Image (cartoon, grey):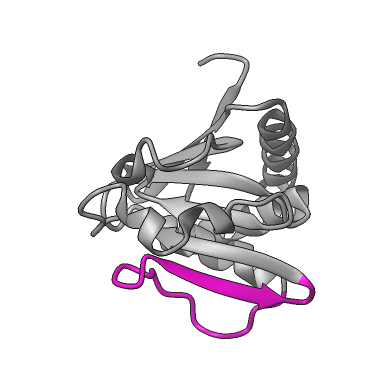
Amino acid sequence: MTKNSNELLINNEQAMVCLGKLLAEASQGEGIIFLHGDLGAGKTTFCRGVLTAFGHKGAVKSPTYTLVEPYHVNGQTIYHFDLYRLGDPEELEFIGGRDYFDQKSLCLVEWPSKGKGALPQADMEITLNYNLPGRTALLYAVTDYGQQLVTATVAAYIQQQGD
């Protein structure tokens, strides 16, 4: 691992939600986060944790068919993308993709490889892998801001899990 990455053991769904909440707290509602992992690895569960931290009370499901689901919660704007069914990265232009990635929002992007070339650079990338019965989460900083997010999220997660 490089200095820009940290790997965490995620024992269960509750821990995945916790990781999302801690990232939300560190982000203060801004940034671009790419989420990698196989189907069922926990990407949407992680997003649920992020949205819950901002006060979202409803269900969080992956926007597989709509590509993006906007959430406006307590003065924060969070965009949850799922690009799994994206046929061509140009499709992001048709839905106004560039407009979503401003500095006043948090963008969570599942399956970013499907939008390669049409997406801006991520601040942080998270790769979720199966490690039965749980998962591992590799948090990787791409930008300086991403490094701040990784450092704060990992430290808070280790402290939280140690309690």
Q: Nearer the viewer, residue 88 or 112?
A: 88
Relative height, residue 39 to residue 6 (above, below): below
Q: Main secondary structure of the magenta part?
A: loop
In the image, residue 92 lies at what x, y percent? 38, 55
Number of numbered tags placed on the structure image: 0
What range of the chain is rendered magenta?
55-75
Residue located farthest toward the left when viewing the structure as drawn: 87
Which residue is the extreme one toward the bottom? 58
In this rendering, is residue 32 above or below 87? above
Task: Answer yes or no: is residue 74 visible.
Answer: yes
Question: Does 69 sit above or below residue 155?
Answer: below
Name the image quarter holding residue 147: top right
Q: For residue 36: magenta?
A: no
**Position in image of residue 119 (x %, y %):** 45, 42
For image coordinates 51% across by 58% down, the residue present is 46
Horizontally, residue 37 falls left or right of residue 149, namely left
> Quick check: 39 left or right of 6?
left
User: Does residue 42 show up?
Assistant: no
Residue 156, quarter of picture:
top right
Q: Residue at x 31, y 47 (%)?
A: 89
- Comparing 17 with 142, the one in front is 142
Residue at the image point whose x is 61% and y is 36% from the top: 123
Question: Residue 3, position in %: x, y?
Answer: 62, 15
Q: Residue at x 47, y 51 (%)?
A: 11
Relative image position of residue 24 (x, y in whole percent): 69, 56
Q: Residue furthest top?
A: 2
Q: Nearer the viewer, residue 12 or 155?
A: 155
